[in-house]
Amino acid sequence: MGESPANKKFLIWGTGNTAEACFQSYSFIQTLHCYEIIGFATNTRHKWGTEFHGRPVFPPDRLREINYDGISVWSKFHKEEILRQMRTELRIPEEKIQDIFGPIREKLCLKYAGSADAEILDTLRRVEERPDLTHFYFRPPEPEELPPGLDFRSHEVFFDDSCGLRFVLFEGKRLYLARSYNLFFSENGKICTGNFWAEQQPHSPHIYESPAVKVENGDVLVDAGACEGNFSLHHIDRVKRVYLIECQEDWMEALRHTFAPYREKVVFLPAFLGEGDTERTACLDSLIPEPVDFLKMDIEGAERSALRGGTRLLSQNPGMKCSICAYHRHGDEAAIREILTERGFSTEVSTGYMLFLLDEEVQRDPEFRRGIVRGVKR
């Protein structure tokens, strides 16, 4: 009988930014944890003898002394050079040079290789080209494609002593971070975090707005699953009112500080959305007392039940627009479009596809999903 995957020990070649991204992918993909990473290799001398994510970092000539089953290259720009070194200088057997993410890539190739959908094939090609696995695969925008005044660089992180919260400057406004937020890194000697508008850049499958579905001046906006509040903060100066719905207490605390300068037009609603009012959930029809112009919803897979709990809200306002996340669960795109169509909406989907690896169902049986279903009330 062959060796059980649970016994496979892997070495990784690479300790740079690409390796960091790949390790994050490996960390949250539970189905890959049957492959144990026992160490890292690098040609960078000053890293020899140190640790990377708690594993020892070896010089290449030490690899002959280590017992391992597979070795993966986590390097974007030097992969071919490293592979040549592994094969010719170190004489590593070809069968040991493996892609630790290979099982997921192979399942996607088997599922979609015969597809006639050009967007699926483009996504599949990008999955095969990247060293790591991520949620998003799309062409980065050219500078001339970016909306005026927007950039997608990282944010420097500041600290507000008055409330004990960190914040970034988002479009010139303070955007506060939850106390539990920890996605920080060092960049040019500064503490930074990723850009909170990156998912909204051109070609992304996670864009909430389109030419037909966008927030207009004077709109009443419902932001369900507000999280850090970037979408509402982006539109705060043009809307009449914003309802911020967020179930996580630490993010609600941060939201109250972010939107303190706009408190006259913001309603804070700490709630879990559901189909009805229960001990655990509240429904949209109970929470929102007035006609709504734009509904944005990103609530981690509860979108279907939340929409069913908003029958009145979705029925009362001709011209209402909505933008609903459809990637959290298998079948969400079709189910959400059906719910909206039944309530008189014409619908569209965002371009491209996502690989939502936080869903364990996707880890076991990988599939591409549309990011957003948008609708306009006819």
Image (cartoon, rainbow, N blue to C red):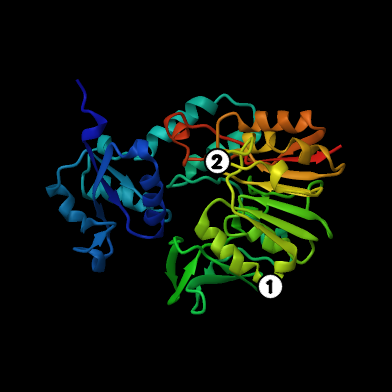
Residue at 36% x, 35% y: name it.
31
Position of 72 with respect to 258 (left or right) is left
Q: Is residue 262 above or below residue 5?
A: below
The mark that comes first in sequence, 2 or 1, is 1
Q: x, y (%) of residue 218? A: 84, 59
Could one spot residue 33 in this view of the protein? yes
Single out the residue that lies furthest toward the left: 65
Inspect the image, locate mark 1, and give the three-letter code of the amino acid beneath it: Pro
Q: Disc 1 marks which residue?
A: 261
Residue at 63% x, 34% y: name it.
305
- Placement of the N terminus among the 4 image quadrants: top left
Q: Quadrant of residue 168?
A: bottom right
Q: Nearer the viewer, residue 135 or 323?
A: 323
Single out the residue that lies furthest toward the top: 1
- Placement of the C terminus among the 4 image quadrants: top right
Residue at 18% x, 50% y: name it.
63
Q: x, y (%) of residue 286? A: 70, 43
Q: Which mark is residue 149?
A: none
Q: x, y (%) of residue 77? A: 42, 56
Q: Is residue 331 above or below residue 157?
A: above
